[in-house]
Each structure stands twice: as structure tokens, then as C-alpha cells.
Image (cartoon, grey):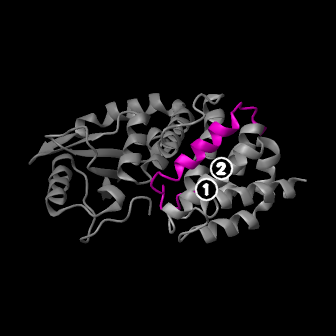
């Protein structure tokens, strides 16, 4: 019954859309290939909702023929099953309309547009894991919400280290330095380190526990004109700079390297030999 219902709804959708234009052929093939998912939609949501979902899906496929919409239906099925499994109430038509709207958003994390639906499912799951309930069923930006939740989870995981990190910052504060338009200071809180990792796109968050226990030192280099904006992340271990990088582990500039050299000379640290730093996390 499900497959018969599915074919009826799909045929209606094809007639309504006219089935013309590049992209719809692949989208329609995906409907047939994943007819089990489509039939489940038809059975649980009703013919009208399923027809409108398929119509919208085919239209979006035509609008973005190379935008990666072919696996939209399986990802949507996954998201809705996740909501059902977790007892999250949703209105089928609203959920389908929202999922279709995600295909209008730019592809996230170097994936396809349909991956935005996967991020929605992940954001639902993460909300319940981190906050104990799902407060935002249809987030404006699933990727941004997921990033916030991941930072919140990391913050909670490292809560016990926060006091120790603050103590380390007080111990190291005397070795702070300012010169030639730059300043450098020790990382003062777990939140600050997590924000640094997020802004700089590096793995400095993985050093939180080592920093808290005194195994390594984490320093934040800034421009004096913009002391809150991340610029260079520095790790000092055993009295020597082990790593110092701009965002995405880019090498420091000549001016930044001179500042670091002056800092080392002022406080008694050692600069690494050679012209290039080792990558953060190496």
C-alpha cells in the first residue's frame, strides 16, 4: 500500500511540476530509488503533504541542478525519524516546508545543499544532549546553532579546569609583553581558549587540560589597537616557543616574528630555530 501510495503522489507531483529543466531528472530518479522513504512520508503525512513535498523538492532541484539535492529525501527522513524517536512534536507540513527552505541556504562545511538537512538533524540531537530538551525545532541557521552547542558542550566538559586556568594566567601574567603595536598575554579562561580555537580554526582547545595542569603554557598575541581580536596563538613549553600561528595555522609574518623574538629576549624564553614554526597540534 505504501509504495502504491508513493507512486500516486509522485506521479501527481511530476504532473504539477511539468518535469522540465536540468536537475529534475536526477531528482526524480532519486525519488524512485528511495521510494521506501517516500512511501513512509506518504503513509505518515498524507497524500497532500507528500505531493507538495515532492513538488517543492523537484522545483529546488531545478533551481540548483548542481547544488547537491539528490540525497535530500533520505536526510529528511533521518531528521523526522530522529524527532519521532526523541518525542519531539512537529507538524508534518511545517517540517517539510522548513526542510525545503534549507535547500535555499548555501552549502555548509564544504558539503552539498542537502547536507543542511543533516545539520538540522544534528542540531536537534545536540540540543537534547547538551541542554536536555529541544527548544529550537526550526533554527534559522542550523550550522550556527550546532557550532554554539558544540562550544557549550566543550565548555561544560572543561568546567573543572576553569579555576586552574585562571590560576595559571595569574602565575604567567608577569611575562606579558607589549611592543611595536602588539601585545601578548596568557589565556585567562576556558571560554577564552575555546573562542580562540573557534576563531583561529586550530586545535588549541585540545591543550586546555595540559595548560591547567602546568604541562604547557598558552599565550594570546593581539594588536594593541584591537586587543580582543584573535591574531596569533602561541604555545610555550619548557621555556621555549613550540608553536605560534595565525588562523588556520598560517605562518606568522616577519613583523610578528620580530615581536615574538623581542618578547623571548625580554622574559627569558627561547625562539625556535629555523624560519618556520611547527604546525599547531603537530
Q: What stretch is highlighted in magenta?
A: 85-114
Of residues 55 and 82, which is closer to you in this image?
Answer: 55
| Magenta stretch encompasses residue 29 | no
Q: Return the residue nearer the eye: 277 or 66.
A: 66
Residue at x 26% of width, y 42% of height:
229
Instruction: Give the percent coordinates (x, y) of residue 156.
Output: 55, 32
**Residue at x 52%, y 31% (from the top left corner):** 159
Q: Nearer the viewer, residue 58 or 271?
A: 58
Assess whether mark 1 and mark 2 are in contact (beta carbons under 8 angstroms).
Answer: yes
Q: Is residue 124 left or right of residue 166?
A: right
Mark 1, residue position: 57
Q: Across the whole image, how many numbered discs are drawn on residues?
A: 2
Residue 102 in the image: x percent, y percent?
A: 53, 48
Left or right of 209, for residue 90: right
In space, the residues marked 2 and 1 are separated at their CA atoms by 6 Å
- Residue 93, quarter of the rendered image: top right
Q: Is the magenta stretch mostly helix, strand or loop?
A: loop
Residue picked out by circle 2: 53
From where the camera sits, is residue 217 visible? Answer: no
- The one nearer the camera, 90 or 158, is 90
Furthest-right residue in this view: 1
Q: How crowded is mark 2: few (under 14 residues within 10 Å), some or many (20 or more)?
A: many
**Residue at image x 68%, y 56%?**
13
**Residue 97 at x, y = what percent?**
59, 43
Callout 1 crowding tier (Cα within 10 Å): few <14, some 14–19, many ≥20: many
Secondary structure beneath dot 2 equals helix
**Is 43 placed left or right of 19 in the picture?**
right
Q: Quadrant of the C terminus?
A: bottom left
- What residue is drawn where x is 50% and y is 46%? 143
Amino acid at each position: 500500500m505504501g509504495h502504491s501510495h508513493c507512486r500516486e503522489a509522485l506521479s501527481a507531483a511530476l504532473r504539477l511540476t511539468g518535469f522540465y529543466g536540468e536537475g529534475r531528472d536526477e531528482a526524480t530518479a532519486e525519488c524512485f530509488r528511495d521510494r521506501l522513504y517516500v512511501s513512509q512520508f506518504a503513509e505518515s503525512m498524507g497524500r497532500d503533504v507528500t505531493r507538495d513535498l515532492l513538488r517543492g523538492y523537484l522545483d529546488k532541484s531545478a533551481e540548483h541542478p548542481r547544488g547537491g539535492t539528490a540525497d535530500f529525501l533520505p536526510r529528511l527522513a533521518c531528521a523526522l525519524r530522529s524527532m519521532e524517536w526523541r518525542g519531539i512534536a512537529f507538524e508534518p507540513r511545517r517540517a517539510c516546508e522548513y526542510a525545503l527552505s534549507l535547500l535555499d541556504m548555501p552549502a555548509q562545511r564544504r558539503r552539498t545543499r542537502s547536507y543542511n538537512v543533516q545539520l538540522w538533524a544534528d542540531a536537534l540531537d545536540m540540543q537534547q544532549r547538551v541542554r536536555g530538551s529541544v527548544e529550537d525545532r526550526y533554527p534559522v541557521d542550523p550550522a550556527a546553532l550546532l557550532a554554539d552547542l558544540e562550544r557549550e558542550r566543550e565548555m561544560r566538559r572543561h568546567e573543572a579546569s576553569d579555576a586552574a586556568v585562571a590560576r595559571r594566567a595569574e602565575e604567567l601574567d608577569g611575562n606579558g609583553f607589549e611592543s611595536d603595536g602588539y601585545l601578548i598575554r596568557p589565556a585567562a579562561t576556558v571560554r577564552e581558549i575555546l573562542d580562540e580555537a573557534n576563531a583561529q580554526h586550530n586545535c588549541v582547545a585540545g591543550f586546555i587540560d595540559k595548560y591547567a595542569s602546568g604541562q604547557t603554557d598558552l599565550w594570546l598575541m593581539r594588536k594593541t589597537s584591537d586587543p580582543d581580536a584573535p591574531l596569533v596563538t602561541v604555545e610555550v613549553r619548557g621555556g621555549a616557543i613550540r608553536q605560534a600561528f595565525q588562523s588556520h595555522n598560517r605562518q606568522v609574518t616577519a613583523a610578528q616574528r620580530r615581536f615574538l623574538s623581542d618578547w623571548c629576549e625580554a622574559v627569558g624564553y627561547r625562539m625556535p630555530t629555523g624560519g618556520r614554526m611547527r604546525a599547531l597540534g603537530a
